Amino acid sequence: MTGLSPLSYRVYAAPRTEGGKLVSVFASAEGDLQAHAARAGTPLSVFLEKLDDTGAHLRVFTPDRDKGDSDSAALAVLSHLQVEGQIADVSSVWMGGQEYPAQLCGGEWLLRQGDVAVTGGPEADLGPLGIQANHLQIASAGRPNLVVTVPTLDDLTRFQPDFDRIRQLGHATDTTGLILCTLDAGRADVAFRAFGPLRGFGEDAASSNMFACLVGTLSVRGALPENEPLVRGLQLMPGAPSQLSAQYAPQPGGASGVWVGGAARRSNE
């Protein structure tokens, strides 16, 4: 790979699927980065500015703007650098002037999301969204999310989002994101979907921050397996299934030291 000839990676893809997120990895940051990203043909492009003792310094773009940071982009670069033997199993990535500690665990890179604070569920009318909820909580790892548990996987996959009503629900509950989840998740610990119209997107295919919040809520509820090193979550945006992994330390009222990541593999697209 030359600096201006990117490799395409698929990040967070659930096993045996073409889901997750597509990322173009550029080995250097030369020339008009926005123009390179526009030509790359993937939703995200990441440029390696430099690699030194402090870690990998990155620039991240969508086809039409400087995104600033992206966990998906960071995981793609880390996976590439690991294959090339250029980075240690414990390192950092730098995006937008901020450091994101990273570690390799079971063949997957995880990024530190920080601590998650969880509170009880608010009074919320979910009827207009057609949701029958078993459990409501608010969780935050910097941004508050309303976490709603539905009974079955069918309830989760059949849900049809109304983004205007999700915005109204966010205003009513002082939250900026909505996470729907179910413990009826097959081989995973939890299945979920993530919505953020108040953050500028409708539904996300793979959200590290929101999965960290979800892990915190399940920890508080005692709903995660004990003595397991990793939590597995399936994020089920229609047409783009993803699998995320997390490490965490249970704490009263939340979780501390939450790390989230997943697999990244070369794509021919």
Image (cartoon, grey):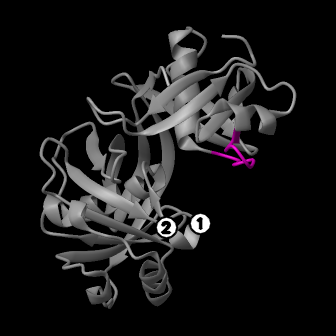
- Decide: marks 1, 2 in contact (CB < 8 A)? yes
Q: Residue at x 20, y 77 (%)?
A: 133
173 relative to 33 in the view: left or right = left
At label 1, the amino acid type is: Gly
Label 1 – label 2 distance at C-alpha = 7 Å
Q: In front: 58, or 53? A: 58
Expressed as whole percent of the image width and height from the top left, the position of residue 111 reads 50, 39
Q: Quadrant of residue 36?
A: top right
193 relative to 257 in the view: left or right = left
Task: Inspect the magenta stretch and tell me whether residue 61 lies in it.
Answer: yes
212 relative to 192 in the view: left or right = right
Expressed as whole percent of the image width and height from the top left, the position of residue 119 reads 36, 76
Task: Inspect the magenta stretch and tell me whether residue 52 lies in it.
Answer: no
Please tell me how many numbered marks the rendered image carries: 2
Q: In front: 113, or 159? A: 159
Quadrant of the snapshot with the N terminus: top right
Residue 64: tell me if it is visible: yes
**Helix, strand or loop for disc 1:** loop
Q: Residue at x 13, y 68 (%)?
A: 151
Q: Residues within 10 Å of mark 1 (few under 14, many from 20)?
A: few
Q: In front: 257, or 147? A: 147
Residue 90: tell me if it is visible: no
- Residue under label 1, please give it: 200
Expressed as whole percent of the image width and height from the top left, the position of residue 37 reads 71, 35
- Residue under label 2, please give it: 196
Q: Residue at x 16, y 47 (%)?
A: 225
Rendered view: 198 above or below 227: below
Q: Which residues are magenta?
A: 60-69
Q: Main secondary structure of the magenta part?
A: loop
157 relative to 91 in the view: left or right = left
